[in-house]
Image (cartoon, coloured by chain):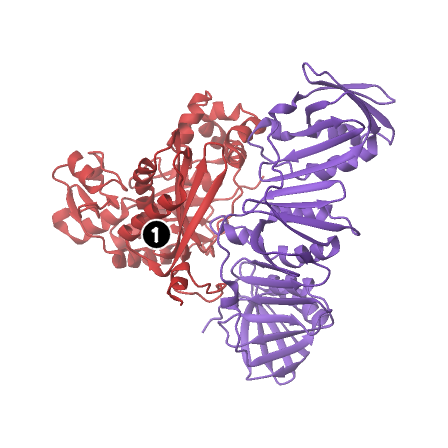
Chain colours: A purple, B red
Amino acid sequence: MKFSVSSSDLLKQLQLAAGAIGSNPVLPILEDFLFTVSPNKLTIAATDLETSITTSIDVRSDGEGTVAVPARILLDTLKQLPQQPVTFNVNDDNFGIEITSSFGKYKLAGENGADFPRIPEPDSVDTLTMSAQSLSQGITKTLFATSSDELRPAMTGVYFQVDFNKITFVATDAHKLVKYTFSEDIKSEVMSNFIVPKKALNLLKNALPSGDDVTMQFNKANAFFSFGDTHMVCRLIDARYPDYNAVIPTENPNNLVVSRGDFQSSLKRISIYANKTTNQVILSMNDGSLTISAQDLDFSNEATEQMTCTYEGEPITIGFNAKFLIEMLGVLEGDEIRMELSTPTRAGIIIPDEMPDGEEILMLVMPVMLSN
Amino acid sequence: MVYRKIIHIDMDAFYASVEQRDDPALRGKPVAVGGGGRRGVVAAASYEARQYGVRSAMPGFKAKELCPHLIFVRHRFDVYKEVSYQIREIFREYTDLIEPLSLDEAYLDVTENKKDMPSATLIAKEIRERILEETKLTASAGISINKFLAKIASDLNKPNGQALIGPKDALSFLEDLPIEKFYGIGKATTDKMHRLGIRTGKDLKSKSKIELATWFGKTGIWYYHIVRAEDNRPVQPHRVRKSVSAERTFFDDINSVDTMVATIMPIVEIVYQRLLKIDRFGRTLSIKVKYKDFSSITRSISFPNEINSLEFLKAETETLIRQNINIGDEVRLLGVGVSNLSGTILAGEQLEFPFPSDLEKLDEP
């Protein structure tokens, strides 16, 4: 079989699919793209057996068939070519591939496309449609809070809770937690919960188009995301998600309202002086004033800043990991944030002072133990 | 190039030596700590017992077979802990960069030290003398340019000895080292290495990064670096263990659930020994199963309280295996882990959300 295509259009689609290729594939063929040529259409697939991406592109073709093409060498070749038509000629017997550009010919050894692992198809699935932008928001606002602890597999993904026309994304690493709910422009007729691994969401975040809608399908084993000509499939994390609602405190008598930007900048300065292992900063609040301080006894470093705030409650002194607070404040939007606290050993809530209609976000963070 | 000076200190047959120190009747005799009960395992064996082949993590009855006059004594963790703190105080006179691995082992970074001593060999010698003086126990030490080599070195002249692997000798030492002596290369990996024709460090070094990555995954990359004496892991004084686990890869895939249950029990015992050794228990038990096709699953169960009984750990592990393995599944690796480790909360420790465990949930109406 044979096909011709623009080098840069092909490169764009290949780079999209390449995200699914793992860094240490267990089978050599997983270092390849699967090319499937049908009349005037090329379908490209890549997989690491957990996550797969399939996309397609219009080509001028002659003959049909499949071949597995080594990804690295093909990507490197196309990157070095200025935009121009390239022709692929595949020997259907030995899977040798010959690429022709305006400069010359490049030969590489392909493999039998029939040996490429089968990409799961949507089978007895539930379906939901939402805008790519909203899904992207849901991922961006939660992904940072996931865990890398393999002993807690549930926490290494984002928990999706679909409730008819409302979707909630939850992520936690047992130290910080984000719950983001979105209820505009969602079309679904189902209720379901599942955990999507973070690798898939990272890929999805980068691949999502800005305009279109995304169709999301899911069954017990897999989630399928489709937009334009691109489909992504990922194996769901098969674990029970922790009962996160149980750890969201309901009695928080101490309330702080402070400028989000000023608070974040202050934390960035103060954290330079914090112990590098714990990143501990100490927040002391009383009427109208918030003191942020840190010290690193090993190096005799210390720093203190004071800022104005609105505070209601008993004076409290509480320690947090500055890195967590800075990340959380960076993901939140709006001018002011509210922190709701009870005691120095219980979770603190951080919420924006106002949110757009149809969106809700709640962040939760556990303190760092203070001495005495 | 400026080399680091890392010392690995390892107490000799720690628990057993403490018992022999405190009870003169045990001195010079084969002693096993733990393993006396009907189904217990040996936590530590004295050098006299080791001559008969008695090893830690061995079932008590098997140890008794090997050494019929073996004396079993109960462990006294409070005493071991006390000695361990005593030793750490000695380390602290030389450096604050101490990374305890367990009650009887620690890494020290003495590149810069409080006594401004230029020789790490002399520091190790002094520390061992001080330990003997203050605790009447012997320790061995390994001195080298990184953690990996220091750990191997401490084994070279054990017991009551020390060894230096200097920067000039490191590469040739590693080349000559039999593959099974590399710390972290267990039986299954050794077998695989042998099948690939790798018997010494030199053979290992001849393999490319890609070959090693293909055969061993991420660990292959690690092998590539360590055989070139490249180990930049710092000595981490504040490292808090969050979990303890152990796993075994099998030479032949296992497909009988009963065999899996039988095979995983020694792994559970090893995990239990490790928990005892770091003196912490956990609330969450996990199993890891890797199938023939390399896909893997992890299943866990949490309890309201710490699990501190070996029998309970074993029973729950069996339940997890039976609940999650289907008939006909072919398994190449089994692992057990305990997480949500307890212990006194220290200042500066990051707290965790108190997620309710699955068990507690069952009690709800």
Total labels: the figure holds: 1
Q: Which residue is mark 1?
A: B275
Q: Residue at x 59, y 30 (%)?
A: A117
Examine the rendered structure and indicate whether residue A31 appears above or below residue B118.
above
The residue closer to the viewer here, A253 or B346, is A253
Mark 1 residue type? Leu
Q: Residue at x 49, y 32 (%)?
A: B293
Residue A1 located left or right of residue A274: right
Q: Secondary structure at mark 1?
A: helix
Would residue B128 be visible to someone looking at this image?
A: no
Quarter holding the C terminus of chain A is bottom left
The x, y position of residue A227, in whole percent, is: 74, 45
The x, y position of residue A369, in whole percent, is: 48, 68
Residue A81 located left or right of residue A286: right
Residue B185 located left or right of residue A80: left
Would residue A224 be visible to someone looking at this image?
A: yes
Examine the rendered structure and indicate whether residue A268 appears above or below residue A188.
below
Examine the rendered structure and indicate whether residue B65 appears above or below residue A307.
above
Q: Residue at x 68, y 14 (%)?
A: A93
Examine the rendered structure and indicate whether residue A49 appears above or below residue A200.
above
The residue closer to the viewer here, A353 or A233, is A233
The residue closer to the viewer here, A273 or A266, is A266
Quarter holding the N terminus of chain A is top right
Q: Residues within 10 Å of mark 1 (few under 14, many from 20)?
A: many
The x, y position of residue A130, in whole percent, is: 71, 55
Instruction: Tell me the chain of label 1.
Output: B
The x, y position of residue B166, in whole percent, is: 46, 36
